[in-house]
């Protein structure tokens, strides 16, 4: 089994080297083929580990002084390497066709080469078996993803998004570094610790440093703001991998930390649950108001991260409260949803990228009528929409169902305080699910249905076969992962947690077939033409359709205390008495709460502090001599005190 992982590592590295060294069109196609082969080996190796039930298998051990670089795998790792293999296979098919339409030949080969190395860095993070190697590959993943976000560097928005992402990801690395240093102080080594007591203050400090680092990378509110900037700026295959896999890699780190490093405290579960509820509800609410198609998908990634955190928080609380079976249900639900989200979010970003590439715009209000012109892409995006909306029997339904069951299962036996917590969580979770369905009715309806609202939408054409095949792999995995979820969990040793969704799906198909047959047999074949009330207009036009703002306007009004909309209205008249209206402009601006009330004030404070500190470096030799004198006196005092 270990040989398959090592072979996949070699193939991923080779897929990155080929386009960087041989800058030809065939090199990009060859890179995609090599990446696909490496993905097949990775999927096979991951599947064998999952079925065999191997507890721990370390297959690379190299000591570099006091810093061990160790690679290995177990069942938890294999779950996420399986996801990485699926996304890599899809990316290998999708990326060459996407890059054909990008500008700048040198940039094409750079992106084509960096994507396999980005995947390889995430694979190394998953396989790391020491805190030192984990930190090193974590930083490598951050640096490579920064350059990928910076691909379209000519645009000012892209440069700002990349710098914002770099700043946030470096803060994440610093937090991870501090947590690892604290662990090394506790254990005396850079190996993975096991079951440290959460009651130890230093252990608690190390956990919260690690959690903060993971939360920033996973897009947990209020550290989420880099996602809606970075994802729209990056090329679509990169967005698919960042949202589908990089966020999942961060969540893997959290799963690993919680289950292996520490014995968690119930307060940790409450904190994670609070972050999860906050992230889920704010993520979907800000996704609803978004008009940028890729920005909407970025916010929905935040929403799904919140759902996974809810599952983890419930698992900790119920496990400590004495409900191990129901707690396991929450844990499996969170883990299943993490994998499901990676698959269907990769599908959605790739198909959205096809639409944006074909139309030349990401603005939902400039699209419409795409389904007629891109039917295969529209079908695949629709499958992703069903998955993310948790429609049975697709894979997005499974994880949420397990978390729902865990929230309800132990409700009557918990202490009153935890009953209130679970009821509040259940209410917010239900609201999140409902708003997610509304959000993707908007995304699909305004993008693919009705009439084209611009010339750009009218001129869209279906993409190449490779750009269909890649998302089709993920769509197939989403369907099979949901339909056969009960059987999969049974094979992995968790039978009876779910109803048989294969039977449910079969009944839905049979019911739909009966309805279709009845309509076909008994519906009238006559065509009737009649004039309807058309408000005095000869035929409907695209200007009569809902816009994105119009569709979500009722939701904005309901949650006005969150969105804090600011309305503007400008009118111009033909006469001095303001009777004959000539033209006007109306607009709604929604406040960017976290950016305007958290990030910008913090940035302003840092700038002011830095400007004051910079005054210490004024070039005065006398002042520098004073600094040296103060440092020497302080050092003498410290040495004398310690002696």
Image: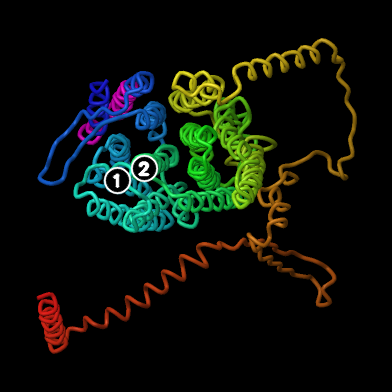
Residue at the image point whose x is 74% and y is 70% from the top: 572
Residue at the image point whose x is 39% and y is 51% from the top: 211
Query: Image quadrant for the C terminus?
Result: bottom left
Residue 280, compared with residue 512, is above or below; it is below
Earlier in the chain: of badge 2 and badge 1, it is 1
Residue 372, compared with residue 255, is above or below; it is above
The percent coordinates of residue 196 (x first, y second) are 32, 47
Query: Image quadrant for the N terminus?
Result: top left
Circle 2 sits on which residue? 253
The quarter of the picture where residue 605 lies is bottom left
- Which is closer to the viewer, label 2 or label 1? 2
Is residue 407 toward the left or the right of residue 542 in the image? Answer: left
Q: CA distance from mark 2 to mark 1?
A: 10 Å
What element does badge 1 sit on? helix
Residue at the image point whose x is 32% and y is 23% from the top: 54
Residue at the image point whose x is 77% and y is 65% from the top: 582
Residue 138, disc? 1
Query: Badge 2: how crowded within 10 Å, few (<14), some, or many (20+)?
Result: many
What element does badge 2 sit on? helix
Residue 630, compared with residue 290, is above or below; it is below
**Chain part drawn in magenta:** 17-43
- Closer-to-camera residue (414/431): 414
């Amino acid at each position: 089994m270990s040989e398959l992982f090592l072979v996949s590592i070699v193939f991923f590295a080779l897929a990155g080297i080929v386009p960087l060294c041989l800058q030809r069109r065939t090199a990009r196609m060859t890179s995609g083929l090599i990446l696909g082969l490496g993905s097949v080996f990775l999927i096979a190796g991951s599947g064998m580990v999952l079925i065999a039930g191997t507890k721990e298998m370390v297959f690379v051990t190299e000591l570099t002084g006091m810093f061990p670089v160790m690679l290995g795998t177990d069942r938890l790792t294999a779950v996420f390497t399986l996801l990485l293999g699926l996304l890599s296979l899809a990316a290998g098919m999708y990326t060459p066709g996407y890059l054909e339409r990008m500008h700048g030949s040198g940039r094409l080969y750079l992106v084509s080469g960096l994507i396999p190395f980005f995947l390889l860095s995430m694979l190394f993070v998953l396989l790391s078996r020491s805190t030192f190697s984990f930190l090193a590959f974590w930083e490598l993943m951050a640096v490579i993803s920064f350059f990928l976000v910076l691909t379209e560097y000519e645009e000012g928005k892209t440069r700002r998004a990349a710098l914002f992402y770099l700043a946030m990801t470096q803060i994440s690395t610093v937090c991870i570094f501090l947590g690892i240093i604290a662990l090394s102080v506790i254990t005396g080594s850079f190996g993975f610790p096991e079951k440290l007591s959460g009651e130890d203050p230093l252990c608690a400090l190390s956990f919260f440093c690690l959690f903060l680092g993971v939360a920033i990378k996973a897009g947990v509110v209020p550290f989420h703001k880099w996602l809606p900037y970075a994802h729209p700026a990056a090329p679509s295959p990169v967005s698919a991998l960042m949202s589908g896999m990089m966020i999942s890699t961060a969540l893997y780190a959290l799963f690993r930390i919680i289950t292996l490093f520490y014995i968690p405290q119930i307060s940790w579960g409450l904190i994670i649950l609070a972050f999860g509820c906050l992230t889920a509800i704010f993520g979907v609410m800000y996704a609803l108001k978004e008009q940028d198609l890729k920005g909407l998908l970025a916010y929905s990634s935040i929403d799904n991260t919140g759902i996974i955190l809810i599952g983890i928080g419930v698992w900790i609380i119920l496990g400590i409260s004495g409900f191990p079976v129901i707690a396991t249900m929450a844990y499996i639900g969170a883990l299943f949803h993490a994998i499901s989200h990676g698959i269907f979010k990769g599908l959605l970003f790739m198909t959205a990228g096809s639409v944006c590439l074909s139309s030349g715009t990401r603005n939902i209000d400039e699209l419409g009528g795409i389904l007629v012109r891109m039917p295969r892409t529209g079908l695949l995006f629709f499958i992703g929409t069903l998955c993310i909306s948790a429609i049975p029997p697709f894979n997005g339904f499974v994880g949420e169902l397990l978390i729902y069951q865990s929230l309800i299962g132990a409700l009557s036996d918990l202490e009153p305080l935890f009953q209130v917590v679970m009821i509040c969580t259940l209410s917010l979770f239900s609201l999140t699910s409902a708003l997610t369905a509304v959000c993707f009715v908007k995304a699909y309806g305004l993008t693919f249905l009705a009439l084209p609202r611009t010339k750009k939408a009218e001129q869209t054409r279906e993409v190449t076969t490779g750009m269909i095949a890649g998302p089709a792999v993920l769509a197939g995995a989403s369907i099979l992962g949901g339909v056969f979820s009960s059987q999969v969990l049974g094979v992995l040793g968790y039978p009876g947690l779910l109803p048989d969704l294969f039977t449910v799906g079969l009944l839905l198909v049979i019911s739909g077939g009966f309805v279709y047959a009845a309509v076909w047999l008994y519906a009238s074949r006559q065509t009737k033409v009649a004039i309807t009330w058309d408000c005095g207009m000869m035929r409907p036009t695209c200007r009569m359709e809902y816009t994105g703002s119009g569709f979500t306007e009722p939701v904005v009004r309901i949650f006005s205390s969150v969105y804090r909309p600011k309305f503007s209205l400008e009118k111009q008249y033909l006469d001095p008495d303001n009777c004959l209206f000539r033209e006007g402009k109306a607009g709604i601006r929604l406040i960017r709460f976290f950016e305007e009330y958290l990030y910008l004030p913090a940035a302003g404070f840092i700038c002011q502090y830095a400007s004051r500190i910079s005054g210490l470096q004024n070039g005065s030799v006398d002042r520098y001599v004073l600094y040296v004198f103060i440092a020497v006196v302080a050092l003498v005092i410290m040495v004398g005190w310690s002696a």
